[in-house]
Image (cartoon, rainbow, N blue to C red):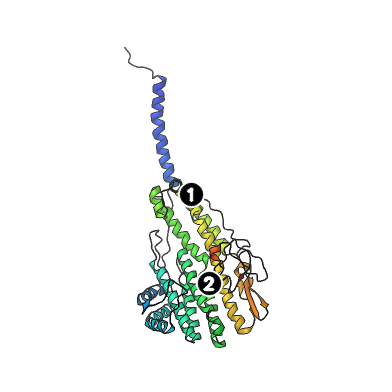
Amino acid sequence: MSTDKRFSRSERALVAVGILVPSLVLAGVAINARLNDVPPLVLPQHTLPVPNAHDTLRVAKVQVVPLKDGIELSPKDIKKVQPLAGRKALLAANTEAIAKIQQALSQEYRQPITYETSQLFPEYAEHRELARLLAFAAKTHADSGNYSEAARCATDAMALGMKIPRGGALIGALVGMACEAIGRNALLGVVGNLDATTLEATLERLDTLEKERWLLAETLEVEHLWSQKAIRDMAKQGPLETAKMLGMGTESGSERWLALRLMFTPKRLAAENNDRHYAKLIAVVKQPYRKGGVSLPAPTDVINEILSPVFDQAYFVDTKNRTEANLLRARLSLLRTGKVAPRFTDPFGQDKPLRVKTDGEHFILYSVGPDGDDDNGRAGVPSQSFMAKLERGRTLSAQDEGDLVMGVNTY
């Protein structure tokens, strides 16, 4: 008797499912592996200079004496009055540290970088302290009547700020701008007391520094490599590890959802989108600042979506920093020659010359500001009330209207 039997319809369906499901799973695994198979990244191997100003500045920080007989380099209360005699004694105690800073300024600077998201930069906080030391020195020299030495120390702080971004990512650029602002503020306090020789020498030095400025586009090239390395690291991790790597929390529903989006974003596609996004971003920041605010490319995936607001603000802050630097040089030129040369351009005003007008016996030197409109020297009023304190300058934001006036809207 034959034992052959026909499979029932349900049995045939089970067999088909048994074959189809594993096949789909294997296909899904293969597709997922393909989508997350990001080509290897070749990171540039920069040779660090020897000596490196980066290392010399770290030595200078160790030599700093922050406090002596109750006198502080950086009192928390900026209105605190510290006796000149005490400040001079504290300045003398920091002679070695200041000499070491000046030694560093004669050296090439390059930021050591690993492109790891876990890399920390304690030196940036140290650099800001060194800028504050130089500003303290400038104020103390000025109050002692030594205005040429005050100008040199203030300009040293600006030079320090221009060195710090070299070879680093965005955080280095922002710290450099902060140090520049500290130096500018110190120099503005003494420009009216400088003789012609010191004015000319200071302007010449600032002109030289401006030619050597590390541009935002160069910083973004470093950020691009950093983000490409991060994408490859994310391809090896789960959502929680990815969120932690990016400094995100996972307590709220929105943070968990963002972490899941990061996990399920195909990393090959993310890398390709990231390349295209940075190419557009770098092209935009190389162009003159656009009237009415920044026009950076819209993010194309969740990774660029996270980073985009940071770059929007950095683009504005960089433009504002360069504008204030040009306003200061124009002020020195105005004091020296009675006019502002066309080479002092307005980054907010399509790189056209900065504006100057007379108000009785006084000059008003200004930029058209972030809105791009010439308001005939009418100083802008910050829309954010906490930014409107006169003691730190009526600092404008990207959306504010009015002109950026020297001595009013400058830090």
> Which-is-in-front pick, marks 1 and 2?
2
Give the quarter of the image for residue 136. bottom left
Q: Residue at x 60, y 81 (%)?
A: 333
Query: Residue 331's spot in the image, x, y percent?
Result: 59, 78
Query: Residue 300's spot in the image, x, y percent?
Result: 53, 51
Q: Please rate how many residues cluster around mark 2, counting C-alpha atoms within 10 Å: few if below 14, some from 14 to 19, many from 20.
A: few
Q: Is residue 55 left or right of residue 403?
A: left
Q: Can you tell which mark lies on residue 298? A: none
Q: Can you tell which mark lies on residue 269? A: 1
Hey, what amino acid is under mark 2?
Glu
Depth check, front residue: 284 or 76 = 76
Dot placed on the residue nearer the N-terminal end, 1 or 2:
1
Q: Is residue 348 left or right of residue 223?
A: right
Give the quarter of the image for residue 80. bottom left
Residue labelled with disc 2: 391
Quarter of the image that includes the N terminus: top left
Residue 40 shows up from this direction = no
Compared with residue 11, is residue 278 higher up or lower down, i.e. above or below?
A: below
Under circle 2, the secondary element is helix
Depth check, front residue: 215 or 161 = 161
Query: Residue 122's spot in the image, x, y percent?
Result: 38, 67
Q: Residue at x 48, y 51 (%)?
A: 270
Give the quarter of the image for residue 82. bottom left
